[in-house]
Image (cartoon, grey):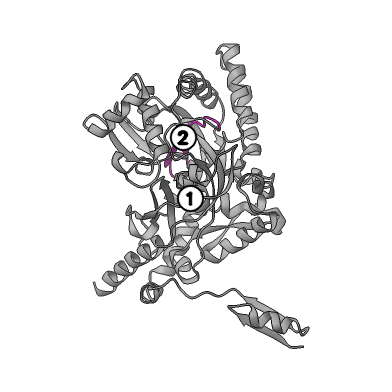
Amino acid sequence: MTTIVNVGADLFADAVAGQAVDVERVDWRPPMPGTEADLATVAADPRRQDANRRALEAVLGVTARLVDVAPASEVLGLQRGEFLHAGPPIDWARASGPLRGGLMAGAALEGLVEDPEDAVALFEAGSSVSLEPCHHRATVGPMAGVVTPSMWMFVLEDPATGRRTHCSLNEGLGKVLRYGAYSPEVLTRLRWMGDVLGPLLQAAVRASEPVDVTGILTQMLQMGDEAHNRNRAGTLMLLRDLAPAMVRSGLEVADVAEGMRFVGANDHFFLNLAMPACKLALDAARGIEGSTMVVAMARNGTDFGIQVAGTGDEWFTGPAQVADGLYLGDYGPDDANPDIGDSAITETAGIGGFAMATAPAIVRLVGGTVPDALATTRRMHEITLGENPRWSVPVLDFQGTPTGIDVTRVCRTGILPQINTGMAGRVAGTGQVGAGLVTPPAEIFPQALARLAELARATSSS
């Protein structure tokens, strides 16, 4: 029996298949332009193979547990006038609309201004405020990712090492700070979260055994969640674990009831635990010299940046892209801001868009089809170093999720990481306008590859 192998264009394969001959199609693409020499240099680096093995093992060896809930001023040391934000470093002059809106809401929340609109002058002057990426403080933030000193934070810990990561509490969808909204209802909700929800969660977490966040992620991926834009099962499992301690907290019955209602009605609540769990795992691979594994993908609404295990804390950036997806109400592409948020840390760890096959219902939110979701998960295996046996995909015979994005594989295949994401309005104050699918700007991977090649040459000549 004859089998034809076709590489590249399908024209020849279609013609042969039309003659009842078996054809094996290979989806081959040339490397990204200009990367050939750097790919050869990095491939010859004697450290690479072992470094990537150790990086992947480090990531897979981490377990994340929720051990505390407390204000950012306590757990991060944030001072008055200090603001964290999503994505790589940026200043006010280049900040996108939703990031500006989130900062304006944060300034009003902290009492730096009475009216959020007055915060514009405050940030333009810059003398009494500072901006810093969440990632620089062992933190991640969804969408605008704005963190201020009074905001309450989830605290996750790896029991084997004691390393910790953090994330703010999830506000829900629509007109919320993380989407750049700053209306009175936004501030009222945030103040309630600070006065009631934060203390309630703190009391419950401190009175319970640490919540196994990694374990919940394992279960929810088999229950139709992918842990980025679908977190329904994860949220309800978290509520199951904390509800008894919340009831026994001794706080006002009405406050306990409202807190439980808020968490249970907010399908995205667990996202703010999935994100720091992924960061906790990926941070274990940071600083492994010679490793080509991506340890962070993050967006600030203007720039998309990545960090790599073997290049320290350096950011490689390019322009953030507008997602392709579904819009709310009368909103359309002209209303959407380019991609924003630290939540792509989920894809970096192998879930979210990489695990869309576990959550076929996600296509009703972000667009595409169920076959697209299955194909996406399969395709991401081509650019990753391995699989995560904890996080498996039932419909793919429980294959582990693709884990450990490899800069060299991205440059060699031209396949970009797939991210599913919410879309914020480009004008400050708008809120959420939709959800969709997006990829990083292609040029940031050759940037990272060039730096890896430079380091490899320096090592070989020393």
246, above or below 298, in the image: above
Q: Is residue 284 visible?
A: no
Q: Residue furthest left?
A: 127
59, above or below 198, in the image: below
Of residue 424 and residue 236, the one placed in the foreground of this image is: 424
Q: Position of residue 162 (x, y in %)?
A: 43, 41
Q: Position of residue 451 (x, y in %)?
A: 32, 64
Q: Which residue is mark 2?
A: 178
Q: Is residue 40 magenta?
A: no
Of residue 47 and residue 345, the one placed in the foreground of this image is: 345
Q: Residue at x 41, y 45 (%)?
A: 301
Of residue 72 and residue 299, the one placed in the foreground of this image is: 299
Q: From which residue to which does the magenta span run?
A: 152-173
In the rendered structure, which disc, 2 or 1, sits on the residue that comes first in sequence? 2
SS at mark 2?
helix
| Residue 449 placement: quadrant | bottom left
Three-letter residue code for mark 2: Arg
Three-letter residue code for mark 1: Val
The quarter of the picture where the N terminus appears is: bottom right
Residue 322, disc: 1
Q: Position of residue 128 (x, y in %)?
A: 23, 29
CA separation in Å, label 2 and label 1: 17 Å
Image position of 317 (left or right of 205): left
SS at mark 1?
loop
- Disc 2 crowd rating (10 Å Cα; few below 14, some 14-19, many 20+) is many
- Disc 1 crowd rating (10 Å Cα; few below 14, some 14-19, many 20+) is many
Q: Is residue 164 magenta?
A: yes
Image position of 215 (left or right of 182): right
Q: Residue at x 52, y 46 (%)?
A: 333
Q: Position of residue 84 (x, y in %)?
A: 36, 36
Q: Residue at x 63, y 44 (%)?
A: 365
For the residues carrying marks 2 and 1, which lies nearer the camera in this image?
A: 1
